[in-house]
Amino acid sequence: MYQRDLAEVKDFIRLPAFVKKIVEEDYTYEKLAQLIPAEVMKNARRVILTGNGDSYCASLALRIFFEKMLHMSDVVAERCIDVGRHFYFNSDEDLSQTLVFVTSASGTGARVAEAMRRCSKKGCSTFAVTASADSLIAKDAKFVLAETGEKVYDYHYSTQSFTYVNAMVNLYLVALYGGVVRGVITPERERELRTELVRYAESFVPVLDDIDTQMYELALSWADTIGYDFVGTGVDIAAAYFGAAKFFEYAGSINMYSDSEDWNHINFFMRDRALLGTCVAASKGNESLSRTIETIGGMVKSDRRVLVVTECAPDQFPAGVTVCQLPDTTVLEFKPLMNFIPFTLLGFHIARMRDLGFFVSDGGYGTGPLFAEEDMNKIKTSEIVYID
């Protein structure tokens, strides 16, 4: 029988200190003011957040927060291939007023480079959110937010959780900076929100071991599951997307993600429902919470096994679901920073239980059958095409 492996939760315990360093040292308000001219933020009329994989997920997580901080309705989270090849740019507009944030830890993928190059050539105000100031996207960007200092992670299960959180925190801080220079929030409120971001991350430290234990026990009871669906609406869509992505990478399982309305139109009709694991992010204060609770009721009635990740009391949900209760924050849009963790821990334990390594490998990072053939998916070597 699989014995609980603590590797992932031990890494997550370090996450709040990682967040605190970014907030209090790497990207203070003063440093952001030096990196990003206030006029760029003041004049912005449109924001495009883009990336691939986990970086696209970070874009999804921050879209609503950017809308609120910049007091702007034209904020979109787009996939890089759409920005690089399909997005329409009106040549009659002043495209310097379109802010484009291209997020990529490595900054070397072909599609992120393509999106950055196209947007910069169009005259957009482009930002590289990356771990490398020497990356492809950093070289083409007008503004660069590059991770500073020594990295606190290595390549293993939790690696992309750290890069994902790093991307989100950087974008949170840029949005807060924009909120101040556009007069949406006061400098005092900006400081309060920075403090709350760190406090929220730190509130998980005392409960992470309990959450991990719960996910380990759930993994054992889900030993025969054949597929998983993840559900989140509004800001919770990020946790759903990230959970599905990690289950692919960790366990190589069949997964999908959806929102609480679309799930009822599509996922509801899945067969072999007793062998499915259904994971729901249901944040307290979410405007769609009532619909999510209704949807959970349908999940239970259709004989699914359901995990609900929430700050709400368990009695708000139908009997028969597993409720993982999280610490709360007064800022709804901050919840994507941490509410993905139970999904990641569950995927970690299911992968370990099935004797799988990182990226469904049989050993170390980047090994196993999917990496046996050189340049199999061409993420970094695909042809970069400029679409005028």
Image (cartoon, grey):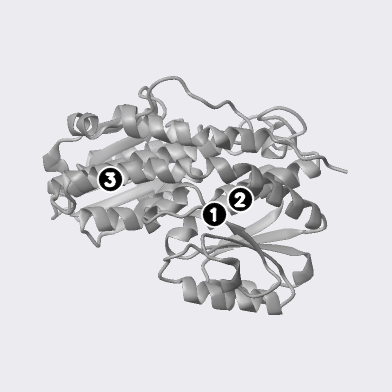
The residue that appears at 22% across and 59% down in the rendered structure is 72
Amino acid type of the residue that numbered disc 2 sits on in the rendered structure: Pro
Q: Label 1 belongs to which residue?
A: 326
Q: Is residue 366 visible?
A: yes
Drawn side of residue 123 relative to residue 151, left or right: left
Q: Looking at the image, is 236 positioned above or below residue 51?
A: below
Nearer the observer, 8 or 357 = 8
Q: Residues within 10 Å of mark 1 (few under 14, many from 20)?
A: many
The percent coordinates of residue 64 (x first, y second) are: 34, 58
Amino acid type of the residue that numbered disc 3 sits on in the rendered structure: Glu
Q: Residues within 10 Å of mark 2 (few under 14, many from 20)?
A: many
Name the quadrant of the N terminus.
top right
Disc nearer the start of the sequence (3/1): 3
Instruction: Estimate the spatial distance between the alpha carbons at disc 3 and disc 2, rounded to whole Å.
Output: 27 Å
The answer to whether marks 1 and 2 mark residues whose Cβ atoms lie closer than 8 Å is yes
Disc nearer the start of the sequence (1/2): 1
Q: Label 2 belongs to which residue?
A: 342
Q: Label 3 belongs to which residue?
A: 192
Q: Is residue 272 visible?
A: no
Amino acid type of the residue that numbered disc 1 sits on in the rendered structure: Leu
Q: Looking at the image, is 207 positioned above or below residue 236?
A: above
The percent coordinates of residue 294 (x first, y second) are: 56, 78
